[in-house]
Image (cartoon, rainbow, N blue to C red):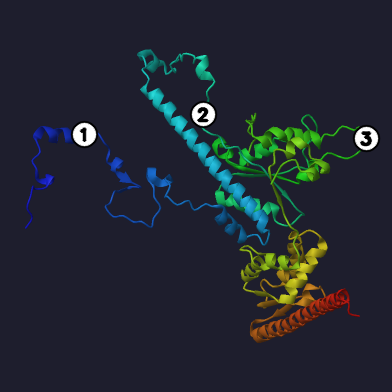
Amino acid sequence: MLLGRPPLLYRGIRPSSLAVAQRWMSSYDPSDFQFGGAGFSSRVDTDTPTFGPLGDASSGINKLTPRALKQHLDRFVVGQNRPKRILSTAIYHHYKRTQQLQQRQEEQDELFRSSQAMGPQSLDEEISHQPRTVHVPPRGDRASIYDFSPLTIEKSNVLCLGPTGVGKTLMLRTLARVLEVPFSMSDCTPFTQAGYVGEDADVCIHRLLAAANWDIRRAESGIVCLDEFDKIAKPKSPYGSKDISGEGVQQALLKIIEGTTLQINTKPERPGGGLTPDLISFGLIPEIVGRIPIIAAVESLDEDMLVRVLTEPRNALLKQYTELFALSGVELRFTSPALRQIAKSAIAMNTGARGLRTVMERILSDAMFESPGSSIRYVLVTEAVSKRECPPAYFARGQQHVFHSIIATEEEEWAVRTEEKKCSTSRSSGTASGSGSSMGQSGKKRAAGFT
């Protein structure tokens, strides 16, 4: 038995209060009390995303960290640990900086709207819809010397150095997809000084605005990537010819890299830093080097790393071609020595990881033409096939055991060869260390007076 005051639900309601409540309810449309076409329910589902005003609220745990960005890069890019750390940190700070700027802009817009709503307006102003002119008295000279504006975090530009085909552009594109920000890629080769035939330097910002669907707010938080940056280095010619694609372009890029407001006149129709002496001697002007405080040197890819690029990433070439053949009902397999030979062929092309696709296309071109619509169900690429000594091996549906038997035989031979290579390497290193130790012992004896 419950004791105490009865619930408020059972208290009487005065007729006047009831009439007021009815008038209040009648002033609203029933759709005001619905969400997504359905009425509100009392059930709470914590697994679904939050909608409404709290949808953009922070959950208290920031999942976007430099470590998380690097882990995402590891799924697509092999190696390059140091550049990954540098780029992940730079992109993270760029993301937090843009968040801070957007939050301040929203607060200023809200304050402006509040001040406009609270200000008195005359009847003439309401009829004419003209904004009211507010005269603000000038501040005294004593107060003008103080700056109460919030701290502004300046952006840090990044320069990636390295040979072609090692993943510089891929890392930037992958991070841009994670943040879901506009991304602009511009080749510096056709850039020329303003007034000459070619592309102006500010075309990179124009492309960024187009990538943001002409949304200026989104474009301000985007990423601009200048590819082939070495093409705008100053020429080292002793002659006095005018340089329109070197220092002139660098001068035009100064304000863009530093951060400034650009005016896009027309909208086209749509269907680690400091003054590095090496960069300056290469042909970059000191002013532009001083505006790039972060430098990430990207390493070349050796044979082992190219094999990993071929097999490990989420969108690896081996997985792509395997899926491509599977769409036609064909199983594609590569042996381990074949993958090694493909990596060696790519190194010989001197184009980095880009050469892997070229080698794969040359090896599989005949198989991709003959397999669809035929009786071929298995395609095997062995070491001899990767060396272009013979075409890929084809097997029908009933030859599955032969297909797997050839794979097992070549894998066993490859394992034996790999083990023999390891043993020979260890014996050679042991011989070298033994000779070094014997020379050291003889030296000690001579130093002690023995002959």
| Pair 2/3: label in front | 2
Label disc, if present, on residue 24 of the rendered structure: 1
Q: Which residue corresponds to mark 3? A: 239
Which amino acid does the dot numbered 2 rest on?
Answer: Ser
Circle 2 packing at 10 Å, graded few (<14), some (14-19), many (20+), is few
Label 1: how many Cα within 10 Å (few below 14, some 14–19, many 20+): few
Image check: 128 left or right of 196? left
In the rendered view, would you say 322 is above or below 402? Answer: above
Q: Report the residue at 73% width, 63% height from top.
A: 357
Q: Tell me which numbered mark, 2 or 3, is placed earlier along the sequence.
A: 2
The numbered mark, 2 or 1, whose residue comes first in the sequence reads 1
Q: Label 3, label 1: how many angstroms apart (C-alpha)?
A: 86 Å
Residue most extreme to the right: 239
The crowding category of the residue bearing disc 3, from other C-alpha atoms within 10 Å (few below 14, some 14 to 19, many at least 20), is few
Looking at the figure, which quarter contains the N terminus? bottom left
CA–CA distance in space, label 2 to label 3: 51 Å
Q: Is residue 340 above or below residue 49?
A: below
To which residue does mark 2 refer?
Answer: 149
Secondary structure type for disc 1: helix
Kindly identify the residue that appears in the image at 60 percent across and 37 percent down. 154
Q: Quadrant of residue 378?
A: bottom right
Q: Is residue 217 left or right of residue 205?
A: left
Q: Position of residue 235 (x, y in %)?
A: 86, 39
| Along the line of sight, the residue nearer the viewer: 295 or 108 | 295
Tell me the amino acid under the disc marked 3. Answer: Tyr
Q: Are discs 2 and 1 less than 8 Å apart at CB?
A: no
What residue appears at the point 9 percent right and 43 percent down from the top-left corner? 11
The Cα atoms of the two marked residues, 2 and 1, are separated by: 45 Å
Find residue 390 and report its image quarter.
bottom right
Screen quadrant of the C terminus: bottom right
